Amino acid sequence: MTEEQPQPAAQVPAASKEEQIGFHKGALATLAKEREEMIKILNIVEQLMQMHVKGLKDLGVDLEAQAKEMAAKQPGDEKATDKLDELIK
């Protein structure tokens, strides 16, 4: 039984310019569609987060005040929205 040895890179024919162009265009088209889907997912997540923030506000929880309070206790370079994200977690 003999195993086939992979050809060294020097012996593998390079793809033609048209093939390379097609490859890159195809990759970009696929990635653009993936980005669109990720944006859809991000929008859904944002809507859900806003629903929960509204629910907490309706229950009397002031997340902005809590974020400011945390920022005052721990001065740093983080924004209040980062603190708000921590509170939500």
Image: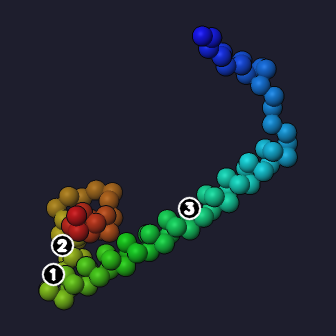
Q: Nearer the viewer, residue 65 or 39?
A: 39
Q: Pointers 1 and 2 in contact (CB under 8 A)?
A: yes
Question: Disc 2 marks which residue?
Answer: 66
Q: Secondary structure at mark 3?
A: helix
Q: Nearer the viewer, residue 25 or 71?
A: 25
Q: Earlier in the sequence, mark 3 or mark 2?
A: 3
Q: Earlier in the sequence, mark 1 or mark 2?
A: 1
Tell me which colouring the rendered structure shows. Answer: rainbow
Q: Nearer the viewer, residue 2 or 53?
A: 2
- Relative image position of residue 9 (x, y in whole percent): 73, 22
- Relative image position of residue 84 (x, y in whole percent): 26, 69
Question: Disc 3 marks which residue?
Answer: 34
Residue drawn at point x = 85 percent, y = 42 percent: 17
Q: Secondary structure at mark 1?
A: loop
- Relative image position of residue 29 (x, y in whole percent): 68, 60
Q: CA distance from mark 1 to mark 3?
A: 37 Å
